[in-house]
Amino acid sequence: MVTTTTVLLVEDHPVVLRGMRALTEEQEDLDVVGEATTASEAVELARTLHPDLTVLPVRLGGTHSGVELCRTIKTVCGSRVVVFTSFTRSVDIQLALLAGADALVSKTASTQAFIAALHQVTVGGQTLVLGHDVASSMPASQFAGSQALTDREREILQLVIDGLTNPAVAARLTIEVSTVKTHVRSILRKLGVENRRDLLRDED
């Protein structure tokens, strides 16, 4: 008796969506129960279908709304989430992990690596597939640890991504602006980006 995992696919590129569906439906233990092309559709389907697993991109509708969508879907239905994306900078991965993603798979990954990641997540695993094959994968916790962001830095990074200025972050966390600046400099260095704009840029 095969245990079936229900899957919601989210993607605004028709060819990619069709490919994901074809690959997923080849697996007898994975059942695609819905497709969405916008964040609002995805949230509505998550509420009504309660999928076990959701696959979504970082970029949706021309913006980085997929990261926020990940957080919302986790809240709405508790679905496990695989982020399938061409955005694989350190900061993009950190944001996906902060939003609660269980896996991040590069769109350069092989079909075998994509399916392997889905199966790993369905049994409670976490993984990052940043290259072409399964050998390029690593535990998500290993990547997060290698970046050595502290809990406070993760908190500040999320607020910066949400658009808060240094004074606004300081007010939210009840700390000095100078302390925020120190943390931001550390975050930029650890993520390998030069300035705050690089944290927010919306391009490959």
Image (cartoon, rainbow, N blue to C red):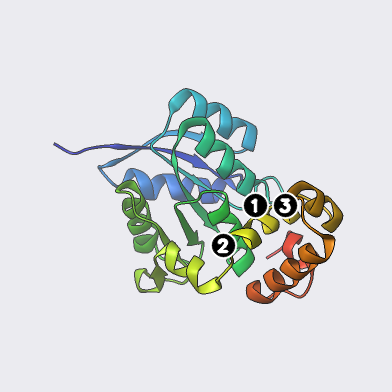
The location of residue 184, given as percent across then percent down, is 74, 67
Please name the amino acid that badge 3 sits on: Leu
Q: Few, some or many C-alpha atoms within 10 Å of disc 1 (few <14, some 14-19, many ≥20)?
A: many
Q: Classify 97 as above or below 72.
A: below
Using the rendered view, name the quadrant where residue 21 is placed: top left
Residue 133: x and y, percent? 38, 70
What amino acid is at disc 1?
Answer: Arg
Residue 187 sits in which quadrant? bottom right
Q: Secondary structure at mark 2?
A: helix
- N-terminal-most mark, 2 or 1: 1
Circle nearer the viewer, 3 or 2: 3
Q: CA distance from mark 3 to mark 2?
A: 16 Å
Please report whichever mark, 3 or 2, sits nearer to the chain's N-terminal start.
2
Residue appearing at x 86%, y 55% in the figure: 167
Report the residue marked by disc 3: 159
Residue depicted at x 73% and y 63%: 199
Which residue is disc 1 drawn over? 59
Kind of element beneath mark 3 = helix
Q: Is residue 96 above or below residue 137?
A: above
Q: Is residue 174 left or right of residue 138?
A: right
